[in-house]
């Protein structure tokens, strides 16, 4: 039986954050309270941020997806 444990996050919901595309540094998720509040991801090394992209995601997951799209 391949039972999914209730406490486990499914792979689809798991947030995988890629390293910075510019310097390879670690990225972190932050929340901005301007414009109704939105999430952003920025690099802790060079400060590259999803703020420089279009779109202001309202969920952490969307912010990470935006970041991951940039990191290609
Ligand atoms: Zn960086």
Image (spheres, rainbow, N blue to C red):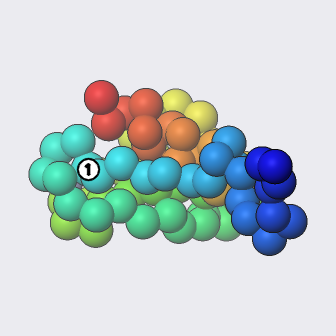
Is residue 38 among what the camera can see? Answer: no
Give x and y (percent) for residue 29. 50, 64
Q: Quadrant of residue 12?
A: top right
Is 4 positioned to the left or the right of 29 in the image? right
Q: Which residue lies most toward the left here? A: 23
Number of numbered discs overlaid on the protein picture: 1
Compared with residue 47, is residue 58 higher up or lower down, i.e. above or below?
Answer: above
Q: Which residue lies most toward the front here? A: 1
Q: Quadrant of residue 56?
A: top right
Is 19 positioned to the left or the right of 39 in the image? left
Compared with residue 31, is residue 21 higher up or lower down, i.e. above or below?
Answer: above
Residue placed under numbered mark 1 in the picture: 20
The residue that appears at 81% across and 49% down in the rendered structure is 1
Is residue 33 among what the camera can see? Answer: yes
Relative depth, front residue between 30 and 26: 26
Compared with residue 56, is residue 46 higher up or lower down, i.e. above or below?
Answer: below
The residue that appears at 30% across and 29% down in the rendered structure is 72
The residue that appears at 72% across and 59% down in the rendered structure is 9
Compared with residue 57, is residue 45 higher up or lower down, i.e. above or below?
Answer: below
The residue that appears at 86% across and 65% down in the rendered structure is 6
Q: Please tell me in which quarter of the rendered image ligand 1 is found.
A: bottom left
Is 9 positioned to the left or the right of 40 in the image? right
Give x and y (percent) for residue 18. 36, 48
Mark 1 residue element = loop
10 Å crowding of disc 1: few (<14), some (14-19), many (20+) = many
Give x and y (percent) for residue 31. 60, 66
Task: Kindly tell me whether mark 1's CB lies below 8 Å from ligand 1.
Answer: yes
Relative depth, front residue between 9 and 31: 9
């Amino acid at each position: 039986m391949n039972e999914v444990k209730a406490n486990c996050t499914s792979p689809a919901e798991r947030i995988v954050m890629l390293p910075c595309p510019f310097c390879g540094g670690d990225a972190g998720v932050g929340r901005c309270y301007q414009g109704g509040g939105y999430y952003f991801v920025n690099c802790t090394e060079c400060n590259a941020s999803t703020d420089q992209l279009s779109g202001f995601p309202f969920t952490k997951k969307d912010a990470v997806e935006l970041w991951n799209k940039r990191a290609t």
